């Protein structure tokens, strides 16, 4: 499995790019999973549903499955911040690519998303000068980058080209399970 992160400020276009990159990779025969860093309060379950009732009754984990999908919900007894490696360990290892959105401080190879300033979007600093894990920059304004770089510059608005670039890199993004072999406890 290959793993690549996408890091950038809120509003820079991370979610849109990942959303467009998924079908671009799928069209190239790739199976894709996503790990997304969520905010403190999120829920995929709804009051009154059987799974919600099981969680409300105190179940540590509830798995709901059909012939189309599977969902695992786990209630932590104490708040904990999971590492991206712990979350990757939970995924099916037979996928070709895992796109990681968020986790900007992780030690995964990442593409920085940087959008040029507009009337609606203020200029933001770049992370690549101080983050050795950033391997490329996806931007809509390469000539406006505030710091020169030798990193590859990718068109933020061309997910097909970005998919081709990822695939051309071969095993550069292969995830080393033995090095990162964390699990949830």
Image (cartoon, grey):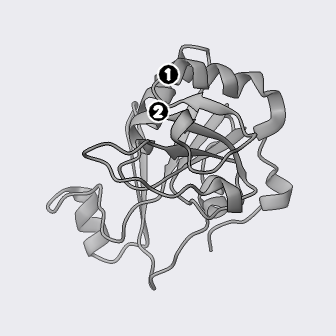
Q: Quadrant of the C terminus?
A: bottom right
Residue 35 spot, x, y in % from top left: 52, 50
77 versus 107 height, above or below: below
Q: Secondary structure at mark 2?
A: loop
The residue nearer to you, when weighing 182 against 133, is: 133
Q: Residue at x 70, y 34 (%)?
A: 152
135 versus 127 height, above or below: above
Question: Most extreme residue toward the left, as rendered?
Answer: 48
In terms of image quadrants, where is residue 13? top left
Q: Secondary structure at mark 1?
A: loop
> Earlier along the polypeptide chain: callout 1 or callout 2?
2
Question: Most extreme residue toward the right, as rendered?
Answer: 178
Residue under circle 2?
140
**Badge 1: residue crowd in 10 Å (few <14, some 14–19, many ≥20):** some
In terms of image quadrants, where is residue 95? top right
Q: Residue at x 79, y 40 (%)?
A: 174
**Badge 2: residue crowd in 10 Å (few <14, some 14–19, many ≥20):** many
Q: Residue at x 52, y 44 (%)?
A: 113
In this rendering, would 53 be left or right of 180?
A: left
The residue nearer to you, when weighing 157 against 169, is: 157
179 versus 163 height, above or below: below
Q: Quadrant of the N terminus?
A: top right
Residue under circle 1?
158
The residue nearer to you, when weighing 25 against 149, is: 149
Residue 74 spot, x, y in % from top left: 44, 66
In terms of image quadrants, where is residue 184? bottom right
Residue 10 spot, x, y in % from top left: 38, 55
Residue 134 spot, x, y in % from top left: 69, 50
In three-dimensional space, the C-alpha distance between marks 1 and 2, rounded to whole angstroms, equals 10 Å
Q: Residue at x 45, y 43 (%)?
A: 14
Question: Most extreme residue toward the bottom, as rendered?
Answer: 78
In this rendering, would 167 be left or right of 140?
A: right
């Amino acid at each position: 499995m290959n793993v690549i992160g996408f890091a950038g400020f809120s509003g820079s276009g991370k979610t849109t790019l990942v959303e467009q990159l998924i079908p671009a990779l799928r069209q190239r025969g790739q199976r894709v999973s996503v790990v997304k860093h969520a905010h403190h309060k999120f829920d995929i379950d709804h009051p009154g549903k059987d799974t919600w009732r099981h969680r409300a009754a105190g179940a540590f984990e509830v798995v709901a499955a059909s012939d189309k999908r599977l969902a695992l919900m786990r209630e932590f007894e104490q708040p904990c911040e999971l590492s991206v490696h712990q979350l990757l360990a939970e995924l099916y290892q037979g996928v070709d690519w895992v796109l990681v959105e968020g986790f900007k401080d992780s030690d995964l190879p990442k593409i920085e998303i940087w959008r040029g300033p507009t009337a609606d979007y203020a200029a933001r600093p770049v992370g690549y000068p101080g983050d050795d894990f950033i391997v490329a920059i996806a931007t809509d304004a390469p000539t406006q980058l505030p710091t020169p770089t030798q990193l590859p510059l990718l068109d933020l608005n061309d997910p097909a080209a970005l998919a081709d670039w990822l695939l051309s890199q071969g095993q550069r993004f292969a995830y080393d399970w033995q090095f990162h072999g964390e699990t949830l406890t």
